[in-house]
Image (cartoon, rainbow, N blue to C red):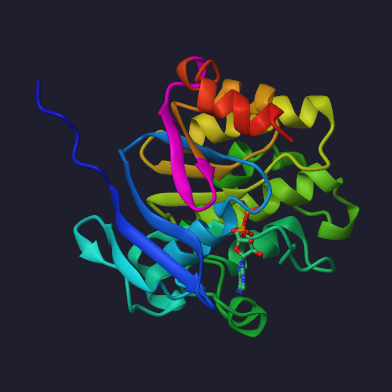
Amino acid sequence: VEMPKPVLLVEDLTVSFDGFKAVNNLTMYIDPNEVRVVIGPNGAGKTTVLDLICGKTRATSGKIQFKGKELMGMSEHAIVHAGVGRKFQTPSIYENLTVFENLEMSFPRGRSVFGALFFKRTPDVIDRVKAIAAEIFLTDMLDQTADLLSHGQKQWLEIGMLLMQDPELVMLDEPVAGMSVSEREKTALLIRKICEGRSVLVIEHDMEFVKTIADKVTVLHQGQILAEGKMEDVQSNPKVIEVYLGH
Ligand code: ADP
């Protein structure tokens, strides 16, 4: 059986801030259709890893290859264009536009409020908005302004805005923070749906949620990988238990 080629190869990745290595010689491979969850205590370097992949932070050394293309040195915009989408924790939706308009605006040719409102609504855009709205459970809310959405629905809308650009790697930072139990369950379904045809890289603290979504877990500690593998193996690893219970 042929092994799938990883979509994302991170090799020997290091970033130093004034001599402090926030990410230290990290090597990690993500497969097509995989949901990978990065866990680890505060300050472990999780956010920095996503910042490095999306080009927000420049690495000191190492390789980041996406579909065979080197991302290091590329602009954030070029990395998005290459197919890497990242949802930040700070919201970027337009509260006084409708759900439809928010999604429409994220269609690759839109890009700005002005641009999106200026373009004609062609059937391909309408179809895509409707398909994405169904995935993010917002079909009934398409004509509502975004300010009327619940906290969880706003998070889904942002994920939908990412999906409009059809990324092959979707990166999410604590996607269920502040969500209700039922919103968490739906978000798990959404993430499992997103990974059909894409890869997903998630930072998450809620271990119950991690168990429901993760194919594999990477445990970071002090910028390095402490353990990696299936959740059931990782959570019984003595080194992992020590890091989580040791303080
Ligand atoms: P996590 O997301 O796992 O909580 P972070 O990636 O946010 O951890 O941070 C890892 C370490 O790197 C922390 O000690 C943090 O203070 C430090 N760090 C992150 N970004 C910067 C920066 N731009 N300048 C200096 N130190 C930073």
Residue ranking furthest to the right: 148
**Which SS type dominates the magenta stretch?**
strand
Image-quadrant location for residue 11: bottom left
Q: How far from the left and from the top, in percent, is residue 30?
A: 34, 42
Image-quadrant location for residue 76: bottom left
| Quarter of the figure that contains the N terminus | top left
Q: Is residue 14 above or below residue 214?
A: below
Q: Residue 190 versus residue 106: which sits nearer the camera?
A: 190
Is residue 60 covered in magenta?
A: no
Q: How far from the left and from the top, in percent, is residue 150?
A: 87, 45
Q: How far from the left and from the top, in percent, is residue 220?
A: 51, 43
Q: Quadrant of ligand 1?
A: bottom right
Span of residues in magenta: 220-232
At x 37% / y 60%, what residue is drawn? 83
At x 50% / y 15%, what residue is drawn? 232
Asked whether residue 153 appears in the rendered view, the answer is: yes
